[in-house]
Image (cartoon, rainbow, N blue to C red):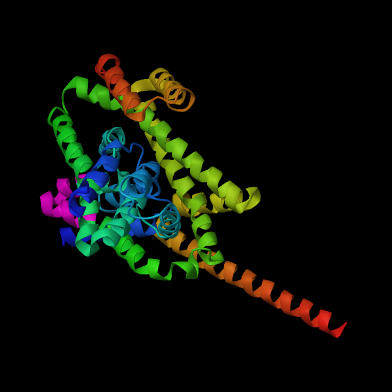
Amino acid sequence: MRLNPYVELSIGFARTGLTGFGGGPSTIPLIEYEVVKKYKWMSEDEFGDVLALANTLPGPIATKMAAYIGYKVKGGLGAIVAILAHILPSIIALIGLLGVLYAYRHSPIVSGMVLGVTPVIGFMLAEMAYSFYKKGHKGLGLSKMIIFTVISFVTMQIIGIHPGILIGAFLLSAFFIARQKKKAAKTTEVIIERKEKSL
Amino acid sequence: MMYWDLFLAFLISNLLGYGGGPATIPLIQNEVVNNYGWMSLSEFGDLLAIANALPGPIATKLAGFIGYEIGGVLGAIIALAGTILPSAIAVIILFKFVDLFKDSAEVKLMTKSVQPIIAVLLAVMAYQFFLTAFQSSGIIHLLLLTVLSFLTLIKWKIHPSLVIMGALIYGGVFLSGS
């Protein structure tokens, strides 16, 4: 028996929002289970296509998926329902928990707890930094990755340029380099074809 | 004006964050701590700790909480709108043209090119947290907790929210005097 589509969207996305730990990217397999296997809103191939497109756009991944799937099922209102069901429970829990923590901020036990968790957060951030470094190493190659890392460090941390400016510059140069490469590949094809014809 | 700043801060950090929510963490920190001074780095650290212990996407948890702290419920809505709307609308509109650039070489190289920047930003943040821990709790607690983080999270694959709870208890018991 199928429920009202808005109710199904709410249940599916609330469940993935509440069980996915470690941020949006780790929630993707859970979303796929609800969308493809449980509620059959789209095929596995279509899900893969949406995911590929969502990955090429900036911003949080889970809400991009919720937006598209909600929109596909029930239009604009469906998109809003899916996003809210996915994000609201954890935001409300966070405001409540931190509210309690901040209320007892000056108690020695709470400040000790904060100190205890600081190295763990440091470690989690270092691990995320490492996984981005690894992805970059795989995608760009070792030498380019080292050069870009050094450039990023010097411009942002020593010169103090806003990360947005650097990201904009990297995005633009990547776009034009990829375009140049495409053109170069085409012209060599043309030259080879001509040679073959003249032979 | 404050609401506009909130919208802008979260719009910028999420438009620049390639690689999902985690990639936007250092960019949000840059806006919230360095640029607008809405919270200190250690407050941002507490927020990150609790946010990591809860399920759900990280970028929207940060936006919802910071928006709520700065401007109440309306502030939370505005910060969330800046975080979600541009990319959510883009994915709905662009899916109609998906074949044009799903395999586009330009987009692939663009996504790759941003990774070194995100890696550096995250590494610098990690360093700041280690430095804070070193200055306030000393080298022994720092080393112990870092090694334990590695063992529990990477080696034994224990759930992050359990590790964070463990660290909170450890701090409450052993670090409440410092």
Q: Quadrant of residue A59?
A: bottom left
In terms of secondary structure, what is the magenta stretch mainly? helix
Q: Residue at x 64, y 75 (%)?
A: A183
Q: In which quadrant is the C terminus of chain B drawn? A: top left
Where residue A51 sits in the image (x, y, percent)? 42, 55
Q: Is residue A89 above or below residue B176?
A: below
Where residue B33 sits in the image (x, y, percent)? 29, 47
Q: Is residue B6 visible?
A: no
Q: Which residues are magenta?
A: B65-80
Where residue A165 sits in the image (x, y, percent)? 42, 62
Along the line of sight, which residue is nearer the eye, B144 or A188?
A188
Along the line of sight, which residue is nearer the eye, A189 or B148?
A189
Residue placed furthest toward the top: B173
Along the line of sight, which residue is nearer the eye, A54 or B18?
A54
Q: Residue at x 23, y 61 (%)?
A: A74
Residue A159 shown left or right of residue A22 in the figure: right
Q: In which quadrant is the N terminus of chain B drawn? A: bottom left
| The stretch drawn in magenta includes residue B131 | no
| The stretch drawn in magenta includes residue B72 | yes
Where residue A129 sits in the image (x, y, percent)? 47, 41
Q: Quadrant of residue B135?
A: top left
Residue placed furthest toward the front: A1
Q: Is residue B11 above or below residue B151?
A: below
Q: Quadrant of residue A73?
A: bottom left
Residue placed furthest toward the bottom: A198
Q: Is residue A125 above or below residue A57?
A: above
Q: Is residue B106 visible?
A: yes
Q: Residue at x 55, y 60 (%)?
A: B109
Q: How many marks?
A: 0
Q: Residue at x 29, y 32 (%)?
A: B53
